Image (cartoon, rainbow, N blue to C red):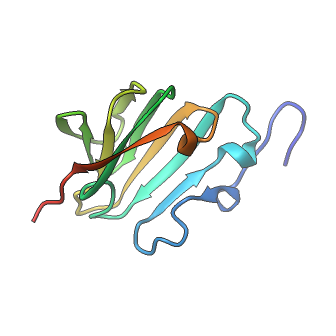
Amino acid sequence: MATSNYRIVERGEAENWMAGYEGFGEMLSYSGPLEAEQVALTLRRMPAGTGGRGSYGHSHKTQEEVVLVLAGKVRFKIDDDEFDAGPGTAVRLAPEAVRSIHNDGPDEAEVILVSQRGDPREDAVKHEDFWPATD
């Protein structure tokens, strides 16, 4: 439903950026369907053992991000620091901070990502071999 003053978007209307990656959960972008002009809003559902460990990290050219942990516990790697964050914990990331998050399990985790509206893929800088996998 839309009016000139607000828009409601259901979960099924959000774009799932993880579609096609079986077993990796969801990364639901609400910004486009909401027709948000300034704010990007993403819900990331992470099954146990998923996320950025064993993969690349990223930073941004201009985009600040805030991550709010809703459920479960996730492990952050930001630059050379690693730490765990549980429900109700918010983390602000400067654009230049190289980052990744991972759910070490055993339970599913959910986080909300908030940033400035725009295409984060155009603003992102990929950092290969940022967080090696553990045995």
Q: What residue is drawn where x is 32% and y is 51%?
A: 56
Q: In which quarter of the image is residue 67?
A: top left
Q: Where is residue 122 in the image (x, y as percent from the top left)?
A: 57, 41
Q: What residue is drawn where x is 47% and y is 52%?
A: 44
Q: Where is residue 69 in the image (x, y as percent from the top left)?
A: 38, 42
Q: Quadrant of residue 81?
A: top left
Q: Is residue 101 above or below residue 24?
A: above
The answer to whether 28 appears left or right of 57 in the picture is: right
The answer to whether 114 appears left or right of 89 in the picture is: right
Observer-nearest residue: 9 or 129? 129
Q: What residue is drawn where x is 74% and y is 49%?
A: 33
Quadrant showing the C terminus: bottom left
Tally the numbered discs: 0
The answer to whether 98 appears left or right of 26 in the picture is: left
Q: Where is residue 38 in the image (x, y as percent from the top left)?
A: 68, 28
Q: Where is residue 28 in the image (x, y as percent from the top left)?
A: 57, 54
Q: What residue is drawn where x is 33% and y is 56%?
A: 51
Observer-nearest residue: 115 or 96? 96
The answer to whether 100 appears left or right of 17 in the picture is: left
| Outermost right residue | 4
Q: Is residue 80 above or below residue 72?
A: above
